[in-house]
């Protein structure tokens, strides 16, 4: 996942190199049956795609900018917070740049400084101002401002998720008008989750084991996806599952 801000940075780092033939070789390399289901370091690619280092990096950057490959870089992403264990296990200093076939469903969250800020249209505060606007127009401005605020919070809190899932979450949180509830449960046909936000009276300490040993974590926020989990939790508290 790349933001527009990160893509602009990559474009500046390609130094005008085209490398179309190298781009084709990279796509073919990732598409082979024995590679398309794995996250690779750029050093793995370098062993099979012979070209200059600058040309190779430029080709990878261009493919990433065009969303033709999966891509993560320690400059833009936080490997250790990825939901994928193979990315989490990579040392940011040693791996540097990771790539994978675009159909492989893995990701790493962007660093906060590389997340796009929501772009808002200029509100008509001058040349007539708010006082001259109809109630319907004012309602539309308020509704849009609330959505932009919610979407910005979602993009930060759930940066590791795909854009489509973040859009669904924004639609849900828009109804309660906040993105960081102390506790909130939602379930429908397409999206079910529980989410918690730590407060002084309710810190969040969890134990997680993803297959390489248990870890105790203190979380700022925690979200668990799954309809069965929402239903089970409702049953525990005596609620009727929806």
Image: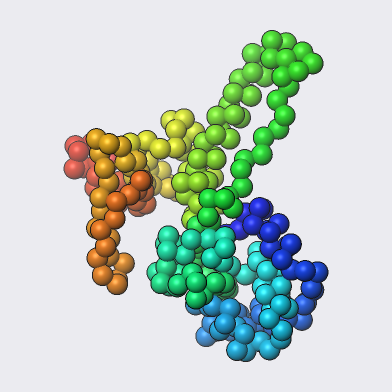
* Residue 227 shows in the view: no
Does residue 115 sit above or below 130 in this rendering?
below
Q: Where does residue 145 sit, x and y in percent of width and height?
A: 59, 29
Q: Quadrant of residue 21?
A: bottom right
Answer left or right for 114 relative to 122.
left
In the rendered view, tell whether residue 125 sits above or below residue 26: above
Image quadrant containing the C terminus? top left
Say which of 52 and 166 sits in front: 52
Quarter of the image with the N terminus in it? bottom right
Image height check: is 79 above or below 242?
below
Residue drawn at x 71%, y 84% is 52
Q: Quadrant location of residue 26?
A: bottom right
The residue nearer to you, when weighing 227 against 63, is 63
Task: Measuring from the top left, give residue 201's x and y in whole percent.
Answer: 24, 35
- Lateral position of residue 193 relative to residue 48, left or right: left
Residue ranking furthest to the top: 131
Q: Residue at x 77, y 77 (%)?
A: 19
Image x and y of residue 125, in percent: 71, 19
Seen at 52% across and 70% down, the residue is 104
Q: How is the image coloured?
A: rainbow
Residue 237 vs residue 14, the one in the foreground = 14
Q: Position of residue 205 (x, y in %)?
A: 25, 50
Q: Residue at x 68, y 89 (%)?
A: 50
Residue 22 in sight in this render: yes
Quadrant location of residue 121?
A: top right
């Amino acid at each position: 996942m790349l933001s527009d801000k990160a893509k602009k940075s990559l474009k500046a780092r390609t130094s005008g190199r085209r490398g179309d033939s190298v781009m084709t070789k990279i796509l073919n390399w990732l598409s082979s049956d024995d590679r398309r289901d794995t996250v690779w370091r750029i050093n793995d690619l370098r062993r099979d795609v012979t070209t200059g280092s600058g040309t190779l990096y430029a080709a990878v950057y261009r493919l990433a900018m065009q969303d033709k490959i999966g891509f993560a870089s320690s400059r833009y992403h936080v490997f250790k917070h990825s939901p994928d264990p193979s990315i989490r296990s990579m040392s940011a200093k040693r791996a540097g740049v990771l790539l994978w076939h675009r159909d492989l469903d893995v990701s790493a969250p962007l660093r906060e400084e590389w997340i796009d800020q929501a772009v808002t249209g200029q509100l008509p505060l001058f040349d007539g101002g708010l006082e001259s606007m109809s109630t319907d127009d004012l309602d539309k401005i308020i509704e849009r401002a609330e959505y932009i605020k919610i979407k910005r919070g979602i993009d930060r809190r759930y940066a590791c998720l795909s854009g489509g899932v973040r859009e669904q979450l924004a639609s849900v949180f828009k109804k309660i008008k906040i993105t960081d509830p102390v506790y909130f449960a939602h379930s429908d046909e397409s999206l079910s989750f529980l989410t918690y936000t730590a407060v002084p009276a309710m810190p969040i300490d969890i134990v997680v084991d993803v297959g390489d040993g248990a870890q105790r974590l203190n979380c700022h926020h925690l979200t668990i996806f799954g309809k069965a989990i929402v239903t089970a939790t409702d049953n525990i508290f005596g609620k009727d599952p929806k």
